[in-house]
Structures are given as structure tokens and as C-alpha cells.
Amino acid sequence: MLRQLGIRDFVIVDRLDLEFDSGFTVLTGETGAGKSILIDALSLVLGERSDAELVRDGCARAEISAEFDIRALPDLAHWLETNDLAGEPGVCLLRRVLEAGGRSRAYLNGRPSTLAQVKELGERLVDIHGQHEHQSLVRSAAQRELLDAFGGSLPLARDVEQAWRRWQELKRRRIEWESNAKALAAERERLQWQVRELTQLAFSAAEWAELQADHRRLAHAASLIETVESALELLSEGEAAALTTLNGVVSRLQAAQEFDADLKDVLDMLEPAQIQIQEAGYSLRHYRQRLDLDPARLRDVEQRLDAVHSTARKYRCTPDELPQLLAQAESRLEELGGTAGAQALLKEEREAGEAYLSVARQLTERRGRAARELAGLVTDSMQKLAMAGGRFEIELERLSEGGAHGQERIEFQVAPHAGAVPRPLAKVASGGELSRLSLAVQSVTSQVARVPVLIFDEVDAGIGGRVADIVGRMLKELGRRHQVMCITHLPQVAAAADHQWRVAKQQVAGRALSSVTPLASGDRVDEIARMLGGLRITDTTRKHAAELLGKT
């Protein structure tokens, strides 16, 4: 819902800070007081085109800001996150700055944004019904979504879209195959040969590490044997071996220890050295037993390394990249249709097309039933809204090849009076008729409509009496599920509201300025009395106003 609206130097408004409540709110006041300026300001911050003439005379710029509570709109929060425009959780802040020179800037949650982004967001937040570009009822996409929501077909519509995209992707791949058959056949032949060669090589990253270790050991086997035998000779097996010498030293010191016990510390250090040298000798002899000259094994390892290096040079990669190259070749070969080629792609395409047609037919059937029911309900509602004899129809125009949104184009049509031929809404409805028709549609679909804020302008044009009472009751009922605002000149409509604001124009320092005042219950009586009786408010008009308020 809309929480706050701030307006600075806009047309005849110098400064307004408005806080909104849920339910049904009316804006009343004398003609020319500036009631529509609030809608114009809100439209501007929601992405409408700007005009430098909207900046108040003598000011450098106009600024509009709006705060929305979006806690009940998880899809909208996801959209903000996806577009890197998320702000405080559950809150959406919009700001529009219009300079006197004509330049305009828009911000979403403090971040500079394009007008297209702001407009897309605005269409999800507010629906303005009247002679206005924000009127969703005349947009084809909004009509389709509303019908699907009413018929409970939104999940099926998403399935249809996914099936369509799958079908079109396979069609694209098949056409690409056919258009580039020769080049693709050559590529597939090359990939098959490459996969066959790399598969036969049967090379892995683990083998590469093992081969390198084996080659280092086998290539230096003679040197390793010589080194180990020399070490054994010096440590334990030669006549002047370190172990023999150390044993002699230890033996003599043990004998001398009988004469001086202080030698024990030295013996304690030498005895571990004896043990370590003995262990080193055992380990070297064990290593020497396993270390043999094996020219045949060395030759095998070198041949294997040569095969790996040769293949890597051929494909201009390092040996350890060969397994990844094989995986990539297999993946691309599968994408090209493997050995089945165009026939496999054609088969997949046909199956995807049949799957699309299956879900699209289901959607068409549901839309047909929902269109008949919705048209009947809206037509009934029109009879109560000064459109007697009129009728509402929903045309499902069959598309020759279908599309992402199904096999039909949806168009709302209306015959505003008896004898009229139904035509698209935007072509036949006046501002008042379109606004009342919007009220009828919104009332019927209020439980499934997803735009939280509804604003009605001109809804009372050309009506009065009993119809005005009906309009007021319908708006009040709609306000139970949405935040509803309405500009009205009719006391019956104003009396039905949960909240009432009076818009007034006054002269300040020779300039006209507009102000907005929330009305308490007593003030509402006076304002509705003014609406009933004009400039002269009498006890009779006050009594009538109180009676109107008492009915709601």
C-alpha cells in the first residue's frame, strides 16, 4: 500500500506531505482546487513522462517522493533484488526530480533508475482508472493476466510459456542444423574423430601424476643405486663405517664410565645415534632391494609420455587439460545431435511442439470458460453503473501459430449502451465510462487482482442519485481488499469513504497554492453539506450530510 507521498513545487503545490491509510479514501473540493494534481504527481513518480511546465512558476525544480509498503508483495521484492534495486525490507521508495529546464531523474530506493524500470514497477503498485496512461484495463498484457487470474490459470499459463520457449529453442537448433548442415557435419565428424582418439588414449589426471613420478625414478635408477650403496658403505657396511666407529667409541666410554660417572650424559646422547644409524641402514637396504634397473619399464613409461605429449601438442593444450578437452568434445557432439543428427533434433522438436499444444489447448479451454463467466458478471455490474443496456465481452482471437502466452490474443471489449457494437475499450469508452467499467471489473475480480493500490478519477462523471450510492458502496467494498482512492464531486460517494481529504486552493502572496486537509467526522459533515448545497450550508444540508454519513 501507499504510505506517504511528498510533493515539492509541483504545479500549484509548494509543499505537501501526505500519509495514507488502508481502506477507501476520497479527495473532495471545489472544481479547480487541484485534486487531480495529486494523481498527476503520483503518476509522475510512477514513471509517466514529464513536462517542464509542471515545475511551479519561479522554482528551479519539482520533486515527488512516494513510500510503499511491499511486505505483501514477494514477487515485487524479488524483482527489486533481481534488478539490484532492493532497499529496506518491506519498503519501496520512489523519487522523481523534474528540473525547470526539462531534465528529469528517477530513483528507486535511492539508486538512479531508468524510466522504464520505474514504469514497470509502477504498474505493479498502482492502477489509475480514468483518462490516464496508467489505466491497466486498456493494456493487452494486463487483460490477459487478469483473465488468467480470475480463471485460476496463472500456473498453467506459466507452463505454456515454458513449453513454448522449449519448443522454440529446439526449432532454432534444428534450423541452425539445416542451415549449416555442411559445416555442422564437418564439425561433428571432427568431434567424433577427436572423441575416438582421446577415448583410445584413455588418459586421466591421476595417471599423469603417476607417470611423471615413475619416469623420474626409472630414469635415475642407476644414480639412485650408486648413491644408496655408497651411503650403506659409509654408514654400516664398510670397514670404516660410521656405525662401527661409533660402536667402538661407545664401548670405550662405557668402560671409562666406571671411573667417572659424569660420562653417562655423553653415552645417553650417543646410544640413540647408534639406533638411528642402524634404522637408516635397514631402510636403505630395503629401498635398495626394490630399486632395480628396468630398461623395459622405463621404455614403456617414456613411450606413454611421448604419446600423451604428442596428443597434447596436436590439440594445443597441456597434458593435464586433455581429459577436460574430451568432456567438452563429447558435450558439443551431444548438442549437435550425436550420430542421429537432424532426425533426432526434428523428433525432439515435434515432441516439444506436441507438449506445447497440449498445455495450450488446456489453457484455451479454461480461458473460454473464464471469459464467459467474467463477461457475464461485469455486464451485470455495468447495469447498476449508469451503463444500462451495455455489455462487456472478452474476445479470444485465435493465433495461427500460437505464442508464449497461448494460442489466442485476449481483448476486452465493451458496448456502453444498448444497440452499440462491442469495440476495444480504449476506442469507445469515455473517461467516466472507462472509470466505471474499471470499477465493475475490479469489483468482480478483487479477490484475484494483484495491484494493491487502485485510484479512480472521473468515476462519478455523468451519474448521480441511486447510481452514486451504488458506486460509493462498491468502492467501499473494494477498499476491504485494496487501498482505494477516488476523486469525487458526489456526496453519496464521499460519504461511503473510510477517510476524506479536502483539497483547497488559496492565494498566497499573489500566487495560487493548493493544500490538502484530512477531515475529522465533524468537518466531513460540513464538507459533504457543501457538496450537497453549494456555497450556502444550511441546517438542512448538514442534517442530510449527517444522514449520508450515518448510512455507511
Image (tube, rainbow, N blue to C red):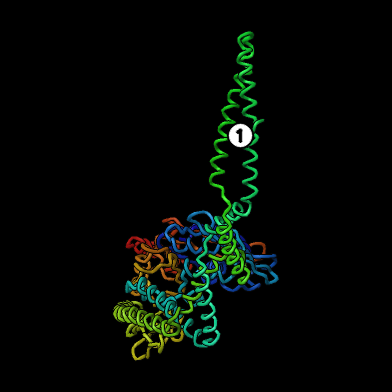
Figure check: 13 above or below 345: above
Residue 501 showing in the rendered view: yes
* Residue at image coords 44%, 60%: 74
Q: Is residue 51 left or right of residue 191?
A: right
Q: Identify which residue, 122 or 179, lies in the foreground.
A: 179
- Percent x, y of residue 266: 64, 18
Which picture quadrant has residue 437? bottom left
- Percent x, y of residue 223: 65, 48
Which picture quadrant has residue 420? bottom left
* Residue at image coords 65%, 31%: 239
Crowding at dot 1, Cα within 10 Å, few <14 / some 14-19 / many 20+, comes out as some
Q: Is residue 191 left or right of residue 101?
A: left
- Percent x, y of residue 528: 42, 64
Q: Give the residue at the far front of this rendering.
A: 239
Which picture quadrant has residue 462? bottom left
Q: Which residue is mark 1?
A: 237
Q: In which quadrant is the C terminus drawn? A: bottom left
* Residue at image coords 58%, 57%: 295
Figure check: 529 above or below 370: above
Figure check: 472 above or below 235: below
Residue 506 showing in the rendered view: no
Q: Identify which residue, 138 or 10, lies in the foreground.
A: 138
Figure check: 233 above or below 18: above
Q: Is residue 157 left or right of residue 254?
A: left
The three-letter amino acid code for the residue at tag 1 is Glu
Q: Identify which residue, 198 or 83, lies in the foreground.
A: 198
